[in-house]
Image: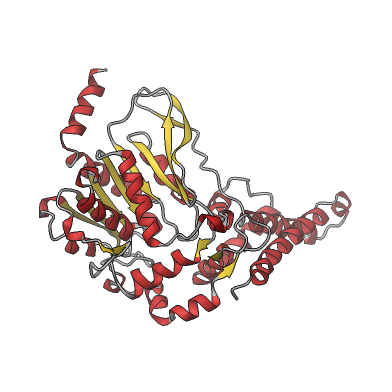
Amino acid sequence: MKNMATYDLMETIRNTNQWLGATAYSIGSYPITGLAPNPFFQLLAAWGEVTERSFARMIAKPDWNIHTVVCADGRDHIVSVESEVERPFGDLIHFKVHGRKIKARKVLVVAPMSGHYATLLRSTVASLLPDCEVYVTDWHNARDIPVSQGKFDIEDYTLYLVDFMKHLGPDVNVIAVCQPAPLALAATAYLAEEEPEAQPRTLTLIGGPIDPDAAATDVTDFGRRVTMGQLEQYVIQRVGFKYPGVGRLVYPGLQQLSSFISMNADRHSTAFYEQILRVAKGQAADHDKHNRFYDEYLAVMDMTAEFYLSTVERIFKNLEIAQNRFTVNGKLVDIGKITSVAVKTVEGSKDDISGPGQCVAALDLLTGLPDEKKANHLEEGAGHYGIFAGKSWRNNIRPLVLNFIDANAGNTHAENVAQLKSV
């Protein structure tokens, strides 16, 4: 499978289905079909519209679509996305709110690199903007990165986080969502030993696989069943000639998407069937609930082969984070060296990706951290998505995280608040 032909075959299939959808929509929408009383043509056009949109989204990077935010003065303030640090495999971006004083809470949201773009956290970012200065890790699609830029594995990812934290300074509060939770913990431990003064003030880990063996899920079961040789043989491919990363070994986004959909195939089939009927009846809209969800869900990105394989092998199979044996550039990263960073874990009781128990395992690894600087929250009834972007996040978890940040902000935060009140 590790050749360009299979990568281009998937792109050809995607492109063909997009074309078929566009063709069906055009035929079904042709004016003369209005003379036929049979609803076949309406259904044909509806199927074509939904199909074309769905397959077109698979190669598009979504926009953040966060244009304004309402501030304490009751006015809408313009939001612009600005690059703070630019790197080949990912940038540090800042959501700058124009016309308001700098917020005392400085938050770095570490987005997952697990098949979707950082925009998957759009609602998370939007909910934090009124109260925080928000920075986000914006990872790049591996297909667009030339081979000349070299490799990118979980050690490189960790060092990227180290550099981003150092750039933002010691008053930053890190929130790592899902996949990057163990690596954000490792990056903090790395700083604790190498540059203690550059450590973040707080670290919040949301639904991450710190110890995958703590709770069985379909993800952990898959990690145990397959061998590294099987993964490399059947899922790793080379980027085709269409993209700047031609020749780079990747885990293709389209292949990842097929895995995502297969996990809940019946639910997705029903969703698309119902959307086609809504379009045929004229009840759908460009930004309705279905399109808002699937425009993001279907937009997938390639991961470098070395990042994907090292994640499976070192995080899930060898349990290097869970057993405090993780190394960066040959140097052991001792999580027990973290002694001053307040750490909070958040889990959902119905999380089927990172089951409850996997994330809270981080607190046991923090042997050098006082108990008063550790916290955990289990959200009853919440699934994986809900703990960082759904109703549970908005109503319960977000306020708890902000309170945790404030409670451990130290003198610097208090001084910033006093300065803001005096303005």
Q: How far from the left and from the top, in percent, is residue 230?
A: 49, 80
Please tell me in which quadrant of the rendered image residue 181 appears: bottom left
Q: Is residue 277 visible?
A: no
358 to the left or right of 122: left
Within the image, what quadrant is residue 53 found in?
bottom right
Up/down of 116 relative to 218, above or below = above
Where residue 16 sits, quadrant-wise, is bottom right
Pick the residue in front: 1 or 128: 1
In the image shown, does 119 or 172 lie closer to the viewer? 172
The front one of 57 and 234 is: 234
Tell which of 414 and 281 is nearer to you.
414
Against 41, residue 222 (above or below) is below
Q: Position of residue 352 (x, y in %)?
A: 38, 67
**Residue in view at x 55 percent, y 49 percent:** 292
Quadrant of the drawing holding the N terminus: bottom right
Q: Quadrant of the C terminus?
A: top left
In the image, is 285 to the left or to the right of 323?
A: right
Residue in the picture at 71% in, 56% down: 46
